[in-house]
Image (spheres, grey):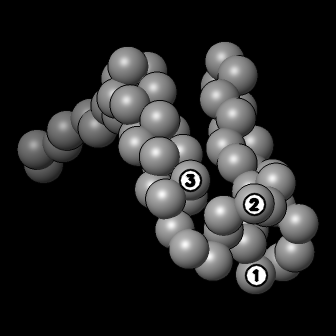
Amino acid sequence: MPSFDIVSEVDMQEVTNSVDQASREVSTRFDFKGTGARFEHNGNEIMLHGDSEFQI
């Protein structure tokens, strides 16, 4: 019976680009202006910060 292996690898540059893009989107949204909502990317972690549950 044939078999195959699946390997998933993450391109960390793409993750960084995605977090940067999401941060730009949050900074331009009218309902997030002046709030503490932000993304942080440190190593293998992405942290979401917000003033309320809605923002997260």
In the image, residue 7 above or below residue 24: above
> Is 50 situated left or right of 56 in this image?
right
> Is 18 situated left or right of 41 in this image?
left
> The disc labelled 3 sits on which kind of residue?
Ser
Residue reaching furthest bottom? 54
Name the spot of residue 37 as percent of width and height, x first.
74, 56
Foreground of the two, 55 or 34: 34
Where disc 2 sits, the SS reads loop
Instruction: Tell me whether the residue at label 1 lies in contact with that at label 3, contact meaning CB atoms closer than 8 angstroms.
Output: no
Kindly identify the residue that appears in the image at 12 percent across and 48 percent down. 1
| Label 3 vs 2, first from the N-terminus | 3
Residue on which the image places disc 2 = 34
| Label 2 vs 1, first from the N-terminus | 2
Which numbered circle lies on residue 19? Answer: none
In the image, residue 17 above or below residue 55: above
What is the CA distance from the residue labelled 1 to the residue labelled 3? 15 Å
Which numbered circle lies on residue 27? Answer: 3
Kindly identify the residue that appears in the image at 76 percent across and 81 percent down. 54
> The disc labelled 1 sits on which kind of residue?
Phe
> Is 47 situated left or right of 2 in this image?
right
Name the spot of residue 43 as percent of width and height, x first.
66, 18
Q: Based on the displayed image, in which of its 4 quarters is residue 2 positioned?
A: top left
Residue on which the image places disc 1 = 54
Where disc 3 sits, the SS reads helix
Where disc 1 sits, the SS reads loop
User: Which one is closest to the eye, mark 1 or mark 3?
Assistant: 3
Q: Residues within 10 Å of mark 2 (few under 14, many from 20)?
A: few
> The disc labelled 2 sits on which kind of residue?
Gly
User: Which one is closest to the eye, mark 2 or mark 1?
Assistant: 2
